[in-house]
Image: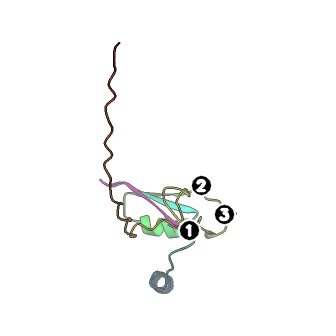
Amino acid sequence: MNDMIVRRLSLAFSALGLALLMGAATSSPAQALIDYPYCMKVYTRDQYTDCSYSTLAQCQMSASGRSAMCYRDPFYDGPPGSPYVIKQPRVPYSPFGSNIDPNYDPYRAAPAPGPHRQVRHKRKTHHTH
């Protein structure tokens, strides 16, 4: 019975990996942001948190044998029992906020400066009478 469960899980993860790979290959610039309800905190020299798990069982399976802990994401906005929430990004998407000029092009060449003309000013002289 355990062999059957292992086979089903490996098939499920293979299908998930293939789906993720295909999604990455056909991704568009304005991707939706996906929030998952469960996170894994990994305690190593470089501690990190990975919030990409739909179920607690998935997280625990990934954390098994490691110095890690699974928990429900306190910032998850989805309804209880939902595997993930898809949020549409603000346009244009920026990790720094939505205060980006949509017409800004970092690769556009700046216009050449115009010719500079030097203007000479006459010095005012004060006459004392």
Percent position (x, y) of residue 87? 62, 67
Q: Is residue 117 magenta?
A: no
Q: Most prominent secondary structure in the magenta stretch?
A: strand
Going by the picture, which residue comes out furthest to the right? 79
**Is 95 in front, or is 16?**
95
Q: Residue at x 33, y 59 (%)?
A: 115
Circles 1 and 2, Cβ within 8 Å, touching? The answer is: no
Mark 1, residues whose alpha carbon is within 10 Å: few (<14), some, or many (≥20)? few
Q: Earlier in the sequence, mark 1 or mark 2?
A: 1
For badge 3, the amino acid type reads Gly
Quadrant of image for the C terminus: top left
Badge 3 is on which residue?
78
* Residue at mark 1 to residue at mark 2: CA–CA distance: 14 Å
For badge 2, the amino acid type reads Phe
Above or below residue 102? Residue 2 is below
**Is 99 in front, or is 121?**
121
Mark 2, residues whose alpha carbon is within 10 Å: few (<14), some, or many (≥20)? few
**Is 91 in front, or is 103?**
103
Disc 1 versus disc 2: nearer the observer: 1
Q: Secondary structure at mark 2?
A: loop
Percent position (x, y) of residue 13? 47, 81
Q: Residue at x 58, y 63 (%)?
A: 37
Badge 1 is on which residue?
33
Mark 3, residues whose alpha carbon is within 10 Å: few (<14), some, or many (≥20)? some
Q: Secondary structure at mark 3?
A: loop
* Residue at mark 2 to residue at mark 3: CA–CA distance: 9 Å
Q: Is residue 116 visible?
A: yes
Which stretch is magenta? 44-53
Badge 2 is on which residue?
75
For badge 1, the amino acid type reads Leu
